[in-house]
Each structure stands twice: as C-alpha cells, then as structure tokens.
Amino acid sequence: AALPLAQQIITCCRYITSAEKNNGGKDPGTYVNEGVQIAQRGALVVRDPVVASVPPFARDLFFPSHQRPDYYGTRFMGFFITDPGEGLVVGQFPHLFPASIAIGYGIDGLTGARRTVGVWAVLGLLAFYFAGARLVGRSAAGAAAALLALHVIEVWFARYPNAEVVMQAVLFAALLANARAHVDRDRFFAPVAGLLLGLLLFLRFDAVLGIAAVAIGLALAAFSGQRPQRSFVVVFAGVTALATAYLLGPMRAYAALPIVFLSNLPAWQYVVLGLAALAAAAALRGAAAWPRLARRVVAWTPGVLTAALAALALYALILRHPGGRLAAHDAYALRTFTDFYLTLPALLAALIGLGIVARRRFWDDPALFLTVAVFACFFFFKIRIVTDHFWMARRFVPVILPGALLFAAAAALSGRRGGWRGTGSVRALIGATFVALLAAHYGRQSRPLLHHVEYAGLIPRIEQLAATIHDDDLVIAESRDAEGDVHVLALPLAYIYARQVLVLNSARPDKATFAAFLEWARSRYGRVLFIGGGGTDLLSHRYGVRPLASDRFQVPEYDAPLDAYPRFVRSKEFDYGVYVFGAPDPAGGDGFALDIGVKDDLHVLRFHAKEMADRRTMRWTRATSYLAVTTMAASARTVTLWMNNGGRPQAAPPAAVTIYLHGQLIGTAVVATGFAPYTFAIPPDLAARAASFADPVELKIVTATWNPHDVLGTPDDRDLGVMLDRVTVQ
C-alpha cells in the first residue's frame, strides 16, 4: 500500500487548488452550477421562478424559442428551458459529475465544489495504478501513474472542472472490476463492474466506447473459456435501462446529437455493426463448440491487434495528410498529440510495450487492451485533438494518455508481470533513465501550473456584486454578443447566489417590447437593474436609466494560443456598470456631451473596453462602432470627437475615419497622433430629422483598423481603430 499511498499524498498536494470557474460561458461553469443546483434544490430538472414569471410577449427578449422538439430555448449557456410556462430548466450535461459536486458543496460550500474535480483526479490515478499493476506489475504501473501525475494536462484538468478525469476514475475502476470478475473469477466484482460501466452513461456519451470495448473483450474472452457472470449482466442491464430513460427523458436534448449521428450512418456501417453484434453473440454462445477456431482466436488476436495499431500509428504519423474531405486537424491528430503531449520516444516505447505486454498478458485483461485501442482509433481518426487551443484538448485524458504511459513504462521497466524477463542491469538502467527523463520533461512542463489558479479572485468579486443586489431586485445582464464578458457573471448570480437574473438575447433588443417589459417588471420588482460592460443598444426615450455603480477588475487566465504551447499568464478583465431603470428623463437640453470611458456602457456599441491613455479615459474603436446620442436639438450644427490614432506604426494603414449621423455621411478625417478635436458639420435638414426621432440618434464611426499582433508581433491581437476620448453634439 505504500506506493499508492505516496501517490495519493503527492497528487493531493498538486491538485488541491482548483480554478475559480463558477462563472458561465464554458463547460466548467456549467458543471459547477449544475452541482450547486442539485445541492440547493435536490432535483435535476429545476423550476426557475424567474423564467416562469416572464410574460409570453417578452420571452423573445431573453430566451427565444429554438423551435426544437427536445427543448424550448436557452436559459444560460449550458442550461436548457424545457417548459417556459412552468419555468422548467435542466443542465446541458449529464449529472454524474455535477452530483459529486453537490456532495462537495454540501461538505465545504463553493470550496468543496471546486475541489471535487481534484478528488476525482486522485481517484483516477489510483484506479489507473491498480488496473495497471494487475497487468504489468507494480513497478511499471507506479512509474506510469507517476508520469501521469506529472503530466501538464493531467495537472491542468485535475484543477479545472471537467468530466474527463471522472471518466478516467470510473472507467479504469470498471476495467479492474471486470478483470477481477471475469478473469480472476471473483464473484464479488461482477456486479461492481456492471454498476460502474452503467454509471458511465450518466457521465458522457462517448463512454459508450468503453462499454463497447468491454463487450468486445468479453466476446473474445469466450474463446479462452471465460464467460460473463450473470450478476454482471443483470446489474448492467438494470443501470442501462435507467440511463436510457434518463437520456431520452430529462436529457433528451443532450442525446439528440448522438441520435442524429447514429441515425445518419452509411448503410455499410449499419451492416458492419450488425455483423459485429452477431459475431459477439455467436462467440458468447458457441465458442466452446469451435475448439479449432477458439485456439486460433486465442493465438492470433494479440498479434493482430498489436500489428494493426502499430500500422495505424505509423500511417497517421508519416503518411496521413489533409486532402479532399480530410481536414488538417483530423489528419494531424496523432502528430499533434505526440508533439505537444506525449513525445515521439514515449509513443514508440508505448507501441513496443503494447506488443510485449499483449503477447504475454492479453488474455489476463482483454478489455483494457481493447479499450485503449478503441478510444485511440476513434479519436485519432474521427475527431480532431486540438479543438480550440492547448488547454481544451482533453478527449485523450481518460484513456489514451494513461494507456500510452502504461505501455511505455512496461517497455522501459522490467517486472514480474510485464516488461522483459531477465533484463540485465544495463537494460534496467536504460529503462529507468528513460522514465526519469520523461518524468523530468513532464514535470518541467507542468511546473508553472503549480502556482497558478485560473480565475483566482473571481468568486469574491461575484460575491461582492451579489451583495449589492436586493432580494426583490430583477437584474438584466448584457447579451453574449455584446463586447464584454459580463454575461458570464449572470449564471452564478442566479444559480449560486439566488438572485433574480435575466440575460438579454441580443445586444439590440426591440425597444418597444423592452419598454413594455420594463413597465411590467417595475410593478413586480423593487428595482430593475442592468449590468453590462458596453455594447448594448438599450437607451430609449420611453424610460430612463441612471448609473448606480461600476467596477473593473482582472483575474489571471492562462495564455491560450491556437496550435501553439501556452506561453504566459495574462489578465482577463471584467469591466461593467450597474444601472437602474426608472421613469423617462424629462425632455429638453440643447446639447449632448459624453466622456468616453466614464459610465458610458449604455451609449457605446462595438467598442473595445475602457482604458486610460494620457490621463484620459478612452476606448478604442473597431472597424465599425456606434454611439447613442440621447439629446439632439434641431439647432445642432456640429459633432466633435476628441480622437488619437494611438501612435500607429508606419506599417499600419493611416487612421482614416468616416462619420455618419442618423445614417447620413457627415464627414471624413485622418486622425493624427495625440488627442485633438475633429469637428464635422451637421446639415440643418439632418438635424431636424434627427431631433424628431423617437429614440436616441445613432452616431456611426467607420475606421481603417490595424492589428498590433500582425504588424508588430505583440500579444495584443485586437483590431484597433482610433482612441476616442470625448464626443459632443452642439
């Protein structure tokens, strides 16, 4: 027990600090909020009273119908509304992992919820070690588990909420229980294996690959005299029946895509699947009746499997190239995995170790070999590895990476149950050196993560914001297509801190409908608030809006380049204002003046975030930016913008700016370095038309942009127009 105990202590120290990802916008926040909802409400499908209260005429402002039979619309990213009238909402992802988060939340609040993924990672390493030790011996399995614990991706996802590390724990435990039950004939583990395999259906749909691999392994094992135990079949069938009702019931929206995928397979693939099922059934029923065939299957299967995987690996590494319908990310999937995550020597060692261990030990655990093979073939040949960026490439975490390290360690280290028997001292030294070098490489890659907490400090900031919102307030948050990321704060405000929150569906909602909704909401709630960071066209003469507060803070976020290794920790900025809706402002006023960057969130659209330059508050424009002019007199004759080109380099195009007011061109200018006023004349007829308009008048700024990353090679990859400091209309 010393080796797994030491692993547990070390990994607890490495995995105990988890990301503060309780915000929306990505999968981790969805998992955490699903778990908290289970803990708080004791249900998978919850009744959201805010959704139920929205009048039918206003639903399209916040959650328009997606016209689908399986769900109505989206409450937050990752949460589906199944019945808007009753307010029924269900999380997008299966609930096994969120249920464990609910347990962590019950033990230690949000801290316990965050650390749940680390607990799963520790359990996954232990399950991997014990399954591997049974097959290749303790030394090789211990080395493989140590390599996995050091690996940068394992460290990252052990501290970042995800279902893959949960699958790693449950699937390797299921494989170990299956081998104990059907190879070692330990009857206790048969129902345990059936239960664990069935539970995978409540975790991720791609877990069916592991279930299919175990089924194939049981069918092949029949040729060596092994048969599935009845308790395994009964328990697995019972859990599968529950999982089927679950997936076709509350999770039917989640199951829709796999059902569509399976229903659109080519006819020949249905034939192959049918023949495979018939062959498996025939093997289970009649393997003993065909002794000659059984001997050939037992003799040839390990070698055929090893040769096939080696051939596929060499093809994917050397010969597979994009072309036709084969995309580059699919063609280079194995190369990407090898270059970024495994290393070529480790892959070659894994293929050698697979051949050695399969030749001697295949029939001691056929399901484990087949599980690694099925996952590798499916993900390397059907699904790309780098999905969005380095930190999101997690599909190989549950099985492929652990399996590769297990076989690589088996090739490098001698042992009673695996590796080369009778290995001399020189070969043993070479093997130990190889493992040590690989461990040093993985440890060096993961070392920067040990002192990094993704989004550290975000939770206290959300708690501060929640404390300013009263129980009888209604909060309206900016939409996902606004410039900022303030909308991601809406999910924890609603589902962790129990605030009444709605998220706009569009950055430009219909103002007449929104005004009618506000009239209804102000009679029902104490205050109706808006939270946004700029980029929402919401101002209207039908209602008033006044600022209450503003906040700006940054949290650490790891660099996430495409097809490149992360380089540094950058700052993720949240900049927002809090406003309260009220009665319409009194008409009047001869002029309009706006200091950009100071409580301007509701006036600007398609600008970059607030900044300071030359002791001035300002924003960078984009290629096309908009500004709402709330006071427009018929006597107005000039529009003045204080602008600065920001010190454009010679390689960038000139800062040419074109200005439109109320849809009409009023002038152009080339902006120079340094803040200066640029004045444009307003024709009298345009001023008269704009003054009679019922809503704020649109000022459009079209700018020739440049990109500092492309021109100068800096980390700033924004498309920048000009700096805008102040706007007046007189």
Image (cartoon, rainbow, N blue to C red):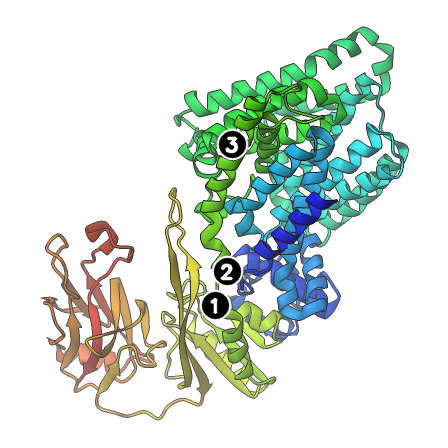
Q: Nearer the viewer, mark 3 or mark 1?
A: 3
Q: In the rendered image of this protein, does residue 606 appear above or below residue 409? A: below
- Evaluate whether residue 186 shows in this view: yes
Q: CA distance from mark 2 to mark 3?
A: 44 Å
Dots 3 and 1: beta carbons under 8 Å? no
Residue designated by label 3:
433
Q: At 78% from the left edge and 26% from the top edge, which residue is drawn? A: 218
Residue type at the position of mark 3:
Thr
Locate the N terminus by quadrant.
Answer: top right
Q: In the rendered image of this protein, does residue 644 appear above or below residue 638? A: above
Residue type at the position of mark 2:
Gly
Dots 2 and 1: beta carbons under 8 Å? yes
* Disc on the earlier residue, 2 or 3: 2
At which x and y percent is residue 267? 62, 24
Residue designated by label 2:
25
* Disc on the earlier residue, 2 or 1: 2
Residue designated by label 1:
487
Q: Residue furthest top?
A: 292
Residue type at the position of mark 1:
His
